[in-house]
Image (cartoon, rainbow, N blue to C red):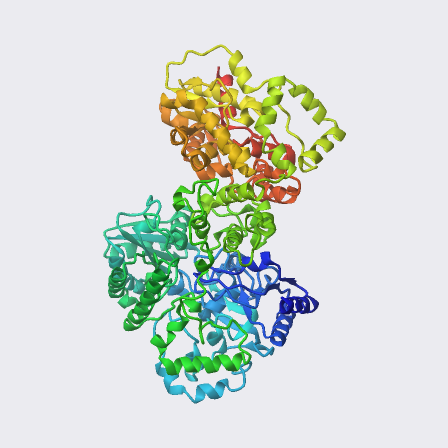
Amino acid sequence: MGVETELVRALRGAVRGGVDGTAGARALVTMDASNYRRTPTAVVTPRDAADVAATLAICRAHGEPVVARGAGTSIAGQATGTGVVLDFTAYMTEIVELDPEARTARVQPGVVLDALRAAAAPHGLTFGPDPSTHSRCTLGGMIGNNSCGAHSVAWGTTADNVGELAVVRGDGTAVTLAPGTWDGAPEGLRALVDAHLAPLRTGFPELPRRISGYALDALLPEGGGPDLTRSFCGSEGTLGLLTEATVRLVEAPRARALAVLGYADESAAAQAAAGLLPYGPLTVEGMAADLVRDAEGLPKGGAWLFVETGGATPAEARARAAAIARAADCGDAVVVTDPAAQRGLWRVREDAAGTATRMPDGTEAWPGWEDCAVPPTRLGPYLKDFRALLAEHGLRGTPYGHFGDGCIHVRIDFDLLTAPGVARFRRFSEDLADLVVAHGGSLSGEHGDGQARAELLPRMYGPDLVRLFERAKDLWDPAGLLNPGMLVRPAPLDTNLRFAVLPREPVGPPVTGFGYPHDNGDFSAAVRRCVGVAKCRTTTPTAGGGVMCPSFRATGEERHSTRGRARLLHEMLAGEVVTGGWRSPEVRDALDLCLSCKGCASDCPVGVDMATYKAEFLHHHYAGRVRPAAHYALGWLPRWLRAVAATRTARLVNALAALPPLAALGKRLGGIEPRRALPRVAPRTFRRWWRGRPRAQGAGRAVVLWPDTFTDHLAPSVGQAAVRVLEAAGLTVQVPPRDVCCGLTYVSTGQLDRARAVQRRTLARMRPFLEAGTPVVVLEPSCAAALRADLVELAGAAPHARVLADSVRTFAEALEEYAPDWRPPRLDRPVVGQTHCHQHAVLGDAADRRLREKAGLTGALSGGCCGLAGNFGFEKGHWEVSKACADEQLLPSVAGADPGTAVLADGFSCRTQLEQLAGVRGRHLAELLAEALDEGA
């Protein structure tokens, strides 16, 4: 402990950027997207090259290793390590210069690839290599791993697109590396190459995706060598620390088309891929049907090739794609030219790294053999042998990836939790390494060797060439402190496994509040879902109305990403770095800014549901303890509002809340943000209005209109409007005679025992309707989501819980399903607003979009989260993040709307946020339709 304190103190005295040796900071970087885990001593976020050099100097003095880290999406373990982790994503994120004429850009290592592509796009340029993690991977990480991506058949690897590199070598020397010169090389490297020309000329396989080992053959004199930059690429932070890079840009096609070719299986697709290369495609990607959640838009087949073409015009791009489709020996094909449709199909491919982590039967699958490559002409035979090897070892996996380059990704259902399973993992790895070499391939074809494959490099290169790798490493890094254990002198591939520290027994009911049915009742298995692909770290909203992860986009901090929170929960269960268990302040603080928007439940490729994990944690964290005041004020909101309704004191409550001193006192006592206005309570609830209205004699299908807390007590006009529309559609509306509640506010504040009790009481009161098979129409999206998802996980053992969950319909779903012939009134006006985040994540909005189209409401609603998110935006300390979320999409869409545009917001939180931050009244779709019906009448 004393050494650590001295190291952190020394770093703080020398580094302008951040230095953090706390348990929370260290826990966030114990893992990357691989199977491996290491615990660092401290995390440094350098501001510039001087900070990098200073950190390295202090670490040399203390004998501490240094690990360079970008977005932490490496899948071979090379972004994990002991010692000091240098996180370049906080400050060193500048595009220093972009020269359109020279087609180059000078960037710092923390620049995200999509940021560079966005800056180059106005000039018609792009950076060629594009891994599926392009929205969060950094240029430094790409150079460290020699990343490739889908377009490598056209534009090559990162090494093919790099010019000069500014590097701090292991001995602290700052140098500039450039092609064609030995300048910057450590003393002795040239002599080492000259003394071993023969093995360097013959020891490296010729194939487009050879990433394994050190590229020492790039230092040979032939072909314009030496090329120190090419040799440095793919060195995984073991030779030097990158501080700046000059990269080459390529001309981006003005138009693109996508030919999707269907084949019987992935072997047939693989055999066909190489034959398409002479047509000059931009990509030739392959994947099988069991990785596709929704095959809509895909041609018939059990596997597909995604072949992209470019052109100066859409017609030219389409003609090239059509020519490939005609020439391909495939069963079926489609050519897609619409950019939005192409993006949707590419998302299927890009999400495969996550979706592949679950087999069709729910079994977990893991990386480890994610990207070996063989010559493209050998891919078909290799895949057949690969399948046979899987069967021999009793394993399963679904290959996909860059078929045009012979590079295969696969997640395999290794058992990494038991000793026999880990032993089989080792045996399979050794056998597969031999198989890849037998086909003339490379153990790594894209993401580097790391710990996953470095131990096996002698099988590919032989011991003599590997010893040359070791000697080169020693020249660059004499003290051996730069990412030790990677590439040379590696740790065994079956050590440092991330799962070894987790509990051996499942963590589930009755210990946990939720049942985790999708994870076999095991909370630790739910946490294991996060494999680190970091789609939650995107700095711009996901295309197509995505939500995840609004708090990360607001703060830019790893601990406020879905992945960061999952990492902390993993370490909480491990108990080594985060030692407080369920009482952990590190986990509590990270989860505090989780909006419980549930965006990750749908947008995360592996379905991490951080809203549920947060509620679970809060349930345990405050068990037997006094909770924050907001948990009582907002978590118990249904109780308080029922009391106001029972005593008929709404007007008095509103009058008192309008007095600034009393309002301020109430907010302070209730833990409510001072800048928030308190919503007005309706003097007459929806249920009182319902009891007092004349009963309509409907002859159509009976439906139950759910009187949720928000509609009943705060926005009864929404319920009244829904009754008007449902009855106009011929439906017979019923309302429960007694109070019912989904338990949402108790769930979101982690009061799971109370939530379960409320839900069970509700189930008893709903029993007559459920036994009659009456569908339940829920107007508030967050309540509908709670009934569909949380109810079953919390009170699933209670009678009729599943029946109620299956009975829930949104307003639009009910009209579409039970009044299919009804035609809504035509409004013929544009709309703006936001799809509720819970609706996006749990319910879906397809029926809503169809209903809006029938009503003549034009325009797409924005994605993201409004930022109020139930209790979140009202809690003290959340104002800035809440406002930042609203400023991201919702408020700009409303501010830019034309006069006469209707503002649509089905969620009470969304309407409240609009009113309080923009002074705009948002309305539920039911209100718009009801107004049109009344005007028509």
Q: Answer with the quarter of the image where residue 157 lies.
A: bottom left
Q: Percent x, y for residue 363?
A: 35, 51
The one of 8 and 542 positioned closer to us in this rendering: 8
- Left or right of 790? Residue 716 is right
Q: Position of residue 653 (x, y in %)?
A: 68, 23
- Res 53 quadrant in image: bottom right
Q: Judge left or right: residue 852 versus residue 557.
A: left
> Height in image: 275 above or below 835?
below
Residue at point 37%, 51% (across, down): 358
Q: Image check: 557 left or right of 485?
A: right
- Position of residue 886 in the picture relative to residue 782 (left or right): right
Q: Is residue 246 above or below residue 197?
A: above
Q: Please state, as top left, top right, bottom left or bottom right, where the N terminus lies in the image.
A: bottom right
Q: 105 and 214: which one is in front?
A: 214
List the single residue furthest toward the right: 661
Q: Report if residue 158 is visible in the image.
A: yes
Above or below residue 608? Residue 26 is below
Residue 588 position within the rendered picture, expressed as x and y whole percent measured from the top left: 59, 47
Residue plotted at (65% across, 19% down): 649
The reply to whether residue 409 is visible in this rendering is no
- Could you tell me residue 717's position as x and y percent? 55, 22
